[in-house]
Amino acid sequence: MSDQPGTNKINKQADLLVVNHLKKYFPVKTGVLKRVSGHLLAVDDVSFSVKSGETLGLVGESGCGKTTIGRTILRLTEPTAGSVNFDGKEVFDLKGDALKALRRDMQIIFQDPYASLDPRLRIGNSVMEGLEIHKIGNKQDRYQMAVDMLKKVGLEDYHSRRYPHEFSGGQRQRIGIARALTLKPRFIVCDEPVSALDVSIQSQVLNILKDLQDEFGLTYLFIAHNLGVVEHISNRVAVMYLGKMVELADRDELFRSPLHPYTQALMSAIPIPNPKLKRERIILKGDVPSPLNPPTGCRFHPRCPIAVAECALKEPPFVEKKPGHSVACWLA
Amino acid sequence: MSVTPATQTRDTILEVKNLKTYFFTEDGVVKAVDGVDFSVKAGEVLGLVGESGCGKSVSSFSILRLVGVPGKIVEGEIFFEGQDILKLSKDEMVKMRGDRISMIFQQPQSSLNPVFRVGEQVAEVLELHKGIKKKEAWARAVELLTLVGIPDPKKKAYAYPHELSGGQAQRVIIAMALALSPKLLIADEPTTALDVTIQAQILDLINELREKTDTAVILITHDLGIIAETADRVAVMYAGEIVEFANVEPIFEKPLHPYTQGLIGSIPVLGNVVARLEVIPGLVPNLIDLPPGCRFEPRCLLRQKYGLEVCARREPELVEVTKNHKVRCWLYTDSDEHSAPLKVE
């Protein structure tokens, strides 16, 4: 069944990335004068760490802030508050060359393999672009490195002379992976890397991501809405709801005994491909509220099947209930 | 009116026979649907499952005759309650759509008109098809919005589509689709654009309404989990053809076609972690330039295992190998040049 190679080893390993009280508010401007009329609380006080060599899965529904976390860690958007420490360096304090050097170590794979490649660049050139920016090797070396990396993701060297439109979605996503890997990063944010792909192609890409992790000792922050995919690839899993982290635990612990009612509902909502399995489904009422004006107290309380009066008044802290299993719920 | 064919039993409401829908493009003829047969019984959910480009959506568009240029239904018959839809006049077809066959689409927001209140849009269906007066139609629209679980329906009927969430918009679409109590509802990826907790709500609603109204549903999806939990019978499509057709339980317990097996093995299933997912090697064939034999042959691992030569040369037929279980594969059917290695008893 579950044999994640080296799970125990990872548990003893040091934190590669530590996120502390991260906040990202987007100002909302209205009217002709573009006055700031409010803030969209995309990420609101989130703390977690990622251990060296592990995959941390980050799940939640649209608008929960999972993508914003990934982008803020890489400083693709600037944070509102909080800190991110990567291998001893304060990411938000870095500037200029130091920031550029950091970017070699931290890469991202995007969701949309169609939008993330320059349509006018041949694939080989696209993949070696990062090497050029960081002035690694001469032109010939760089091209060779790009071709080698393309081979690692299952493409041939003649593919390097082709343009993005000549590839299928799964192939483009593999090119995206090759592009992220040429700089030999240590940490990769995978932002919904397989959700645009058909299932038979999805498994090809997931297997490649696992193989590359073993080969290069990569650390992943794996962002996805598909719990099946996250369970398959992650060592630990964090669940987000409306800008808050509501639960974080080891993969098996989280999926066997979820503590937060939102995690429980989310799991019961996933259709399982087994027609004999008749489950009692927890159907949540209503829609996810707007992050512009989140509910008071616990943000999940208007949809929570077990909420009590207290939940609407006070926000539950994110605390460790069992070793390695944290949850933000008054009733857990 | 056409004559009811002898094969049609009383409770079959839709029968599709040898349907071929091709698209005539500059690059060549795209055989999007290439000889598809299936039937739908009253009150059942037929699942059509397959990956992008397998022809599942084009099949359903063909049933409503919504295939536009450069596409064309080149062959086949579609009997709905005994009438061949393909022989109806344009006006008769307009009457048929919405009245007896309805459809809901993947993107709820783009199926609604952005400049009309949602109540008006639901009422319009009733005014046009039933000749109900405006005021009465509005009241009925509010009833329908209540039925599909729109919160505060009286007020929400005055809302414009942009004021609704994705889940609410899909509920409005379902209200419109059910306004005339159709006999058949075609749901094309109805929850793909929605979050999982909202998806659960919508699937629950479709199930509930089916039980109440006895409407048959053709559910088109790429999600095998949704199929397992919702469908009664399943057709698996690949490259424009049905490759396997059976009741839902045998499809998941004893899938016969190597493609169905690969598809089921390649999904990470919640609560069942495997070290490595199965992979179907290669890519879906180009529908302009199809392989001469079985369309799955270039990706088929079982063909290699059993060393079948016939697969690359001749196309297998969709054959019933056990009761109510059809498969299109030479592993289970003899030809004059080979003996099938995997016969099902």
Image: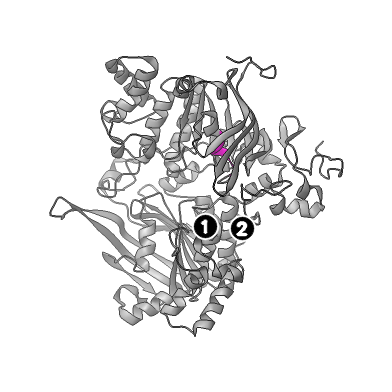
Residue A8 visible at all: yes
Q: Among all residues in the image, which is located at the extreme left?
A: A33
Amino acid marked by disc 2: Ser
Is A240 rendered above or below residue A109? above
B10 left or right of B91 in image: right
Left or right for B22, reference A318: right
Q: Can residue A88 be seen at all in this image of the molecule? A: no
Looking at the rendered structure, the secondary structure element under dot 2 is: loop
Query: What chain does badge 1 belong to?
Result: A
Query: On the picture, is A102 further left or further right than B69?
Result: left
Residue, x 82% and y 36% (percent of image)? B345
Measuring from the top left, give residue A178's x and y in whole percent: 52, 69
Q: Which residue is mark 1?
A: A251
**Chain at tag 2:** A
Residue B281, quarter of picture:
bottom right
Residue B104 horizontal/vertical position (percent): 45, 32
Range shown magenta: B54-59
Q: Position of residue A95 (x, y in %)?
A: 30, 78
Examine the residues drawn in magenta and state their main secondary structure.
helix
The residue identified by callout 2 is A2
Could you tell me residue A155's position as x and y percent? Answer: 60, 66
Q: Are marks 2 and 1 on the same chain?
A: yes
* Quarter that holds the N terminus of chain A: bottom right
User: Do labels 2 and 1 touch, CB within 8 Å?
Assistant: yes
Residue at 69% in and 19% down: B7
Up-down relation of residue B83 to residue A65 (above or below): above
Left or right: residue B149 compared with residue B73 = left
The type of residue carrying mark 1 is Arg
Tell me the number on the disc at residue B189.
Answer: none
Total numbered labels: 2
Q: Residue furthest front?
A: B26
